[in-house]
Image (cartoon, rainbow, N blue to C red):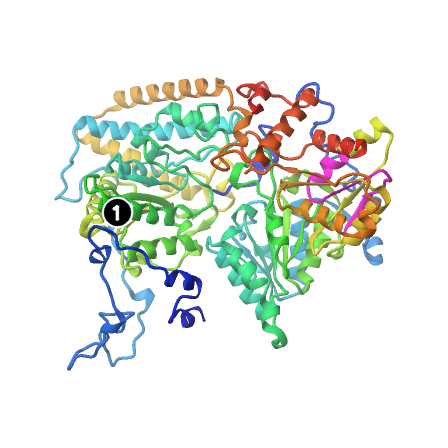
Amino acid sequence: MKAGLARGAPLRSAAGAVRHRPSPPTTPISARHPVRCSSSISQRQGASHLSFPGAVKSAFTSSLKFALAAESPSLPTYRVVDQDGKIVDQSFKADLSDEEIIKLYKNMLLISIMDVIMFDAQRQGRLSFYMVSAGEEALSIGSASVLEKEDVVFCQYREQGVFKQRGFELSDFMNQLFANKKDPGKGRNMPVHYGSKELNIHTISSPLATQIPHASGAAYALKMQRINDPSLPPRVVVVYFGEGAASEGDFHAALNIAATRSCPVIFICRNNGYAISTPTLEQYRGDGIASRGIGYGIDTIRVDGNDIWAVREATKKAREMALQDGGKPILIEAMSYRVSHHSTSDDSFAYRARVEVEDWKRRDNPISRLRKYMEAKGLWDEGKEKEARDNTRRDVLKAFSEAEKEKKPPIRAMFEDIWEELTPDLKAQMKQLREHLDKYPDEYDLGDFEGGKNSLDP
Amino acid sequence: MRWLAPAVSERRQYSTHPPNARLNLPIDYSATPLLSHSSQTALATADLPAEVKNGTTKRMNLFQAINDALSTALTEDEDVIIFGEDVSFGGVFRCTMKLAEQFGGDRVFNTPLTEQGIMGFAIGAAAEGMRPVAEIQFADYVYPAFDQLVNEAAKYRYRDGSCGRSVGGLTVRMPCGGVGHGALYHSQSPEALFTHIPGLRVVMPRSPLQAKGLLLAAIRSNDPVIFMEPKILYRAAVEQVPTAAYTLPLSKAEILKEGKDVTVISYGQPLYTCDSAIQSVEKDLGISVELIDLRTLYPWDKETVFKSVQKTGRVLVVHEAMVNAGIGAEVAAAIQEDPETFIRLEAPVQRVAGFSIHTPLLFEKFNVPDVARVYDSIKKVLDY
């Protein structure tokens, strides 16, 4: 119905259609986009195919044959090192110094140690919620390690490695987790909803997949800004999401619009096998998430997400490709396994066998893979491992106790940032709350909040 | 982000109360008169059919009562199907526990993670004669399904006209409301967004007994029903629930406590807050307050409300969701619009509700109406 009406002028933008906008002064944007005009449909003499506007390269066939989903081959999974840390891609040459490799490893270690400590802290009631990323450290740290600082990142919620790799300090994690007055989220968000303007990572939002179309739009913004000002550095947007989130409409909209507008965006799907309790078999029936990229006309690769080298190589190449030809989207499906529970509120043994998890841990682990690689190169040994673990643990606990001691943000923060400025209504509500707190002082504990009730003064 | 239930009631960081608090004390669900602590009170519940009143009861919390209603619906009608995210293993709040095992994976199943898909799928199934009960994991995540609910479910019967099809078999369940640490995306109470839409019935039960009867009524109803479950009550609210199948009437409010000086209108969890405030204010001032549970928020029971306000002349509406354009706005407007009721008003209608902000993690206790705020409002409406 909608399509039929749209043939003339789209119903929803009927008014917009008659509006004329001046052309941009620089190169016409259309030159940078492949243009397909419906008026070019023509059957050439002896042509093997008709250029249907919706499938321009489709050849005619006289055999009645459906493309059978089950018969199409699975996309291969790219890897550089095997489970034992041995190089299997002979063309691979590490592009990092020994020190840089150790730094990556230490970042992975830090995330995994912080995760264990914070998970336990939640269990003890020291903070309200936590999510670990065990098993996905290579994926987040590896991919982030080949991005530029100016690139823009959108995360889902299990990408603490991305934050760390881009420069988030332990104190940054802890201030957010304890929602203290140094938390840029001003105590409004649940734990693990980090964000950083300085590191170009947008603040995490709980609803799934909403960030994926944001990434397409942000990438278009970067592309337009560079067209308008060629002195800007070339930038891409990177967006992370799980295979569960890829079932949301927003995922499909994001890929499709990024493809049609040729946006320099890298979609990184963390396929870890579970969306809370739902295994991939109940989430989709195709060849993973990667096969969908091809469906949307997006260049795609599947990588072993437990292999930090493979993730790095793939993301490096993806960034290069995303900036070619005026920009284009790339999809990376990184395979891993959610070793952890979904969150501190979940007990995953209610829906999967303990032995399944133990098997995975034993069979493959991104951290021990890099460790084996480093040990084979003579960069690492048991002594260094112990020292690094002890130091990291100490650093995490120090940041933990410092952040826990800080005061909470002022109560006023609950009314601010709804709009750019406080409305008369909100000012009245602030006054109402202030008067109420004055009237019933014994009913409220305000001691932790910076400035107490005085922060509510106009 | 989605998380599971145990954290809700077992580990609450921000529920401690100040040492000298007299009003803002934690709700004692084991003593509240709003729950039936004995079989006799349960079976004496208003609107229960006679044969149910002669039956037995069982102690249940809210998620168990929901589970009981769903199990009953699956048993009595083969057209009932139940689905949503993580429903198979019992749901993140345990409402669908054992149903997949008992009734089979064809009738109780996981869907992929897509709220718009779940809703569209449910509408299609209902349009072809099934009675789908779709679960949205959190009310905070219903928005991708908004188009399907507003443009499809609500308008199906209207546009089909004398062709006669509707999606009346549809019931949509979703947990809602604050638990103390849910912040922006695990605390919302978006009922007012749905009560703006003719064609949808919007229900929010206050207790296990109510939930069982209202949910069965919703499933049997030939109108699409949005059934919102206050998630803080899943484990906290425990009472005796009749074991037989029964329905409670939709679009009918209930007077929980009669009074003559002030009417307090609410629904869902804040009813417990209101009850605590009323107990204090009655003791302190020697007055009597009437407490009304709307139960169905749209189309709502104006008659019961008007009658009460005509008697007391003073009224407040209490809800957790934002005050702006909320249920309180609609109820207050209807009260002043009705000439018989308007003329009896002794004071402006008060609203005690969330401020016009999003739910902030640390400041939830200042935002959700608490006992002190309701208490103060009752005094204000009396002092006018």
Q: Residue at x 64, y 47 (%)?
A: B229
Question: Going by the image, does A31 lie left or right of B311?
Answer: left
Tell me, yes or no, whether the highlighted magenta stretch contains residue A75.
no
Image coordinates for residue A153, horizontal then vertical, percent: 33, 40
Position of residue A449 relative to residue A373, above or below, is above
Q: Residues within 10 Å of mark 1 (few under 14, many from 20)?
A: many
Tell me which amino acid carries mark 1: Lys
Q: Depth check: give the residue in front, A336 or A410.
A: A410
Residue A354: x %, y % from top left: 45, 41
Highlighted magenta segment, given as a residue range: B253-276
Q: Which residue is mark 1?
A: A223
User: Taking the image as drawn, is residue A115 in sight?
Assistant: yes
| Along the viewing direction, whichever of A47 and B172 lies nearer the viewer | A47
- The answer to whether A8 is drawn above or below residue B90 in the figure is below
Q: Is residue B138 above or below residue B277?
A: below
Locate residue B367, reporting x and y percent. 61, 33
In-image side of A40 versus B275 (left or right): left
